[in-house]
Image: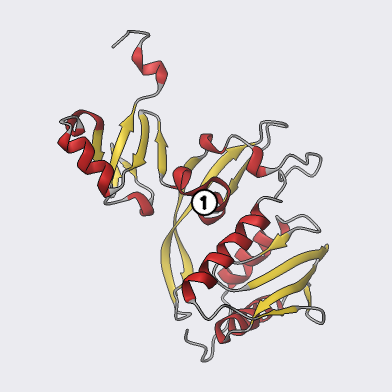
């Protein structure tokens, strides 16, 4: 990670403020892969709860501080727990994922009058939507443009419609939903290599499966699904009620 002369851009500040204001007081923000965990403890107060003993975690925390420095937000750091990571990289990654999933399981509906948990909502109805090209930072802290995607959901208790980050959607729904793309014409589900072999050997791949590129029928394909081979299923309404 390039730490030299890093300063937040206006886009960095705008995105961070938008994200923080969407978290309820008492809610947790744990940026994926950073080893950091914050709690929103006031209208404009963020408290560092956990930080991993690793140079990159310290640098990311410094960037959070720098991003909020020019705003009215304050960051409380005095009671943060220092977490010593496992010496096994795979074990450390696994423990980080478990912690992220524990946090995601506590997320509530964005409607402050509704306490329905996101994890209990019909996540399978999520719709992937692109917001076009937007400014972001790469792994070295350099400004780049990337495709920004969100997943649109609706609370089945209060009908509030909202959007969440794709990574958060993956934490809530797991890989099965993360690697599924619903379209007006049907649903694409990414297949493993073993599944592709079975379908090809069974002689049904041509009629049941489809490869995906960057677009499908004029619509952009979510980046993490591009270049995959998928099982394609039409919605029940397209069957016309006929028996096969």
Query: Which of the 4 quarters of the picture holds residue 30?
Result: bottom right
Does any portion of residue 111 appear in the rendered image?
yes
Residue pictured at 35% horizontal, 28% vertical: 185
Q: Indicate the position of residue 71 as horizontal and vertical percent values.
A: 74, 74
Does any portion of residue 212 appear in the rendered image?
no
Query: Which of the 4 quarters of the picture holds residue 18?
Result: bottom right
Question: Who is closer to the viewer here, 113 or 30?
Answer: 30
Query: Which of the 4 quarters of the picture holds residue 140?
Result: bottom left
Q: Residue furthest bottom?
A: 4
* SS under mark 1: helix
Q: Indicate the position of residue 111 as horizontal and vertical percent values.
A: 75, 42
Q: Indicate the position of residue 170 as horizontal and vertical percent values.
A: 51, 51
Q: Residue furthest top?
A: 242
Local packing at callout 1 (Cα closer than 10 Å; few below 14, some 14-19, many 20+) is some
Q: Quadrant of the C terminus?
A: top left
Residue pictured at 53% horizontal, 81% vertical: 87
Question: In the image, 49: left or right of 172?
Answer: right
As displayed, is residue 102 above or below residue 59?
above
Q: Give the colour scheme of this rendering.
A: secondary structure
Residue at the disc numbered 1: 170
Question: In the image, 203: left or right of 174?
Answer: left
Q: Indicate the position of residue 166 as horizontal and vertical percent values.
A: 51, 53
Question: Who is closer to the viewer here, 87 or 50?
Answer: 87
As displayed, is residue 160 above or below residue 100?
above
């Amino acid at each position: 990670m390039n730490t030299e002369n890093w300063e937040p851009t206006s886009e960095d500040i705008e995105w961070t403020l938008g994200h923080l204001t969407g978290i309820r007081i008492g809610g947790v923000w744990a940026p994926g892969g950073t080893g950091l965990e914050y709690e929103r403890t006031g209208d404009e107060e963020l408290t560092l709860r956990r930080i991993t003993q690793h140079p990159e975690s310290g640098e990311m925390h410094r960037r959070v501080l720098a991003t909020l420095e020019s705003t009215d937000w304050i960051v409380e750091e005095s009671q943060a727990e220092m977490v010593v990571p496992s010496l096994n990289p795979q074990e450390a990654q696994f423990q980080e994922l478990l912690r992220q999933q524990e946090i995601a399981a506590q997320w509530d509906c964005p409607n402050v009058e509704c306490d329905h948990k996101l994890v209990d909502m019909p996540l399978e109805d999520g719709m992937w939507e692109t917001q076009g090209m937007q400014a972001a930072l790469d792994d070295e802290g350099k400004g780049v443009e990337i495709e920004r995607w969100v997943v649109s959901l609706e609370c089945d208790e209060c009908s509030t419609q909202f959007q969440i980050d794709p990574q958060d959607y993956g934490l809530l729904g797991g890989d099965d939903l993360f690697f599924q793309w619903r379209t007006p014409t049907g649903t694409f589900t990414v297949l493993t290599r073993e599944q592709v072999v079975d379908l090809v050997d069974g002689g049904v791949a041509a009629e049941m499966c489809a490869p995906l590129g960057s677009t499908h029928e004029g619509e952009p394909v979510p980046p993490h699904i591009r270049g995959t081979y998928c099982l394609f299923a039409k919605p029940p309404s397209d069957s016309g009620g006929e028996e096969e």
